[in-house]
Amino acid sequence: MQGTDMNVSTSKLKTPIGTIAVAMTERDEVAGIWLDDDSDAKAFDTWLTRHGFEAQPAPEIPATIADQFDAYFAGSRQSFTLPLAEQGSAFERAVWKELRFIPFGGTMSYGEVADAIGHPGEAQRVGQACASNPWLIAVPCHRVVASDGSLRGYAAGLHMKERLLNHERGLLGMSF
């Protein structure tokens, strides 16, 4: 999809971690999911410009998306089945696909992801692909950690990465 001129509709959803913005293509695919805060809003605008999108506000988020996020935060959904708009390089797509196999509450290191997609030694590139992931939570780059298990990098901030992992591990219960 990169390099195309396409309109996306954007809508917002209140969640326990704050309001998220969702961009949908004209084909009803999810082009991106971001936190609707100042830092992520800038990343969202940059992403729209880089991909040649023009954003139009939508009155409400599609129920299929809202229901999946509600179930995730309620603890009854462990993965997302959203129609994602294909984008990114072949390497990024391979990383993003692999991330969806990391179990709920589990983690993999950047190096382990690189090995799993057949690119051993390319942990740094995996980190860059995670940083470019446009689907917050739905493609769970928050489950990728450093080789020593420590938290490194997350577009929504390390505090959010920790909150999401703690939620998935049942350490926060239902509250955020």
Image (tube, grey):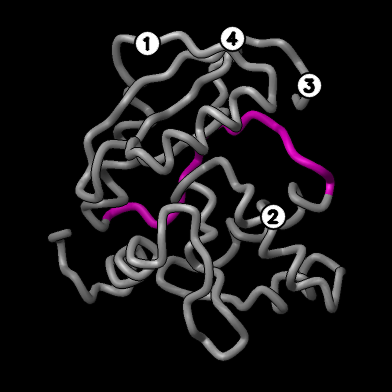
Label 1 sits on what residue type?
Ala
Which of the two discs, 2 and 1, labels the residue nearer the N terminus? Answer: 1
Residue receiving disc 3: 3
Q: CA distance from mark 2 to mark 3?
A: 18 Å
Q: CA distance from mark 4 to mark 2?
A: 24 Å
Q: CA distance from mark 4 to mark 3?
A: 12 Å
Circle 4 SS class:
strand
Residue receiving disc 1: 58
Q: Is residue 25 above or below residue 64?
A: above
Circle 3 SS class:
loop
Q: Is residue 32 above or below residue 92?
A: above
| Main secondary structure along the magenta-highlighted residues | loop
Which of the two discs, 1 and 4, labels the residue nearer the N terminus? Answer: 4
Measured as percent of width and height from the top left, residue 64 is found at 37, 28
Q: Is residue 83 within the magenta segment?
A: yes
Q: Which mark is residue 129?
A: 2
Is residue 29 found left or right of 60 in the rendered image?
right
* Mark 2 nearby-residue class (10 Å; few <14, some 14–19, many ≥20): many
Residue at 47% across / 46% down in the picture?
136
Name the one closer to the observer, 114 or 73: 114
> Quadrant of residue 65 in the image?
top left
Measured as percent of width and height from the top left, residue 137 is found at 44, 50
Which of the two discs, 4 and 2, labels the residue nearer the N terminus? Answer: 4
Q: Which mark is residue 7?
A: 4
Measured as percent of width and height from the top left, residue 115 is found at 79, 75
